[in-house]
Image: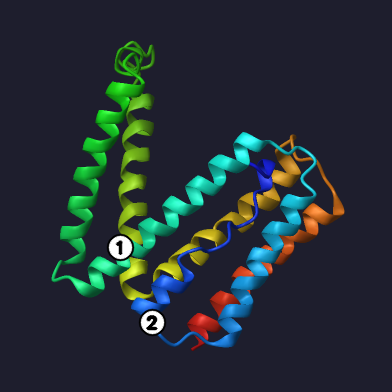
Amino acid sequence: SAFGPCSPPQPPQPFEYSHASCNPAVSMPVKLSVGLMILGAIVAASSDLSFNGQGYTLILINDACTAAYGVCIRFFLANHKMTQNSLLLYNSAFGAMGLGAFMCVAMPDELQRSLAFHEWGESYFYFLFFSAAAAGCILNYAIFLCTSRNSALTTTVIGCLKNVGTSYIGIIVGGDYVFSYLNFAGLNLSIAGSLVYSYITFKG
């Protein structure tokens, strides 16, 4: 992560398009809470003592892809006669084919290295492997469910909130966090924006 072990919640990007197409009424408190999250991320990044350009570039690409992903889910569920389960099936199928093709082209030796992994014969490895796969399926379904019932922006903010615990734990036990008051303040600003947005959204 570009911010070390306590990466602040990334600014939600699917804001304008998502609400313009699916939720036209956006209150000022919602806009201010999103702005607070973005401000916190900027403040934290501006004082990051372990700045890594490649890390920040990958983070921003990930943010853009995540935003587009959430908006596309909401768009197809709202504007096309496609059930949530059908969209989830197509998303998983095409995603698996795309990832498989990418690995064959960009990482041709990865399959052989995976098959040669020395822990394949261990029972605990099978348990952990399939548990991780099941957790991924549950997470993907939860993303679709949250986006279909709320909005792409709400799903993004909820995703940011899950970083609250890991952020503070990372500060304490991570070992590679370079502390600065400005970075820590930005982290807390971003988390406060997430909490305010959640309160406003679910109260209303």
The answer to whether residue 129 is above or below residue 57 is above
Quadrant containing the N terminus in the rendered view: top right
Left or right of 39 on screen, residue 55 = left
| Res 82 → quadrant | bottom left
The residue sitting at 35% across, 60% down in the picture is 142
> Please, what secondary structure does the residue beneath circle 2 have?
loop
In the current view of this chain or complex, which residue is farthest to the right?
181
The residue sitting at 61% across, 35% down in the picture is 54
Where residue 199 sits: x, y (%)?
A: 57, 80
> Please, what secondary structure does the residue beneath circle 1 have?
helix
| Res 55 → quadrant | top right
Assess disc 2: are there few (<14), some (14-19) or many (≥20) residues with their C-alpha within 10 Å of its C-alpha. Answer: few
Residue 73, label in figure: 1
Badge 2 or badge 1: first in the primary sequence:
2
Where residue 178 sits: x, y (%)?
A: 80, 40
The residue sitting at 32% across, 39% down in the picture is 133
Where residue 3 sits: x, y (%)?
A: 68, 45
Left or right of 172 on screen, residue 82 = left
Left or right of 14 on screen, residue 30 = right
Q: Which residue is mark 2?
A: 23
| Res 118 → quadrant | top left
The residue sitting at 36% across, 20% down in the picture is 107
The answer to whether residue 167 is above or below residue 24 is above
Label 2 to label 1, Cα distance in Å?
14 Å
The answer to whether residue 121 is above or below residue 101 is above
Where residue 81 sits: x, y (%)?
A: 13, 71
Residue 98, label in figure: none
The amino acid on which the numbered mark 1 sits, given as a three-letter code, is Ile
Assess disc 1: are there few (<14), some (14-19) or many (≥20) residues with their C-alpha within 10 Å of its C-alpha. Answer: many
143 vs 15, nearest the viewer: 15
The amino acid on which the numbered mark 2 sits, given as a three-letter code, is Asn
Kindly tell me whether residue 3 is visible in this rendering: yes
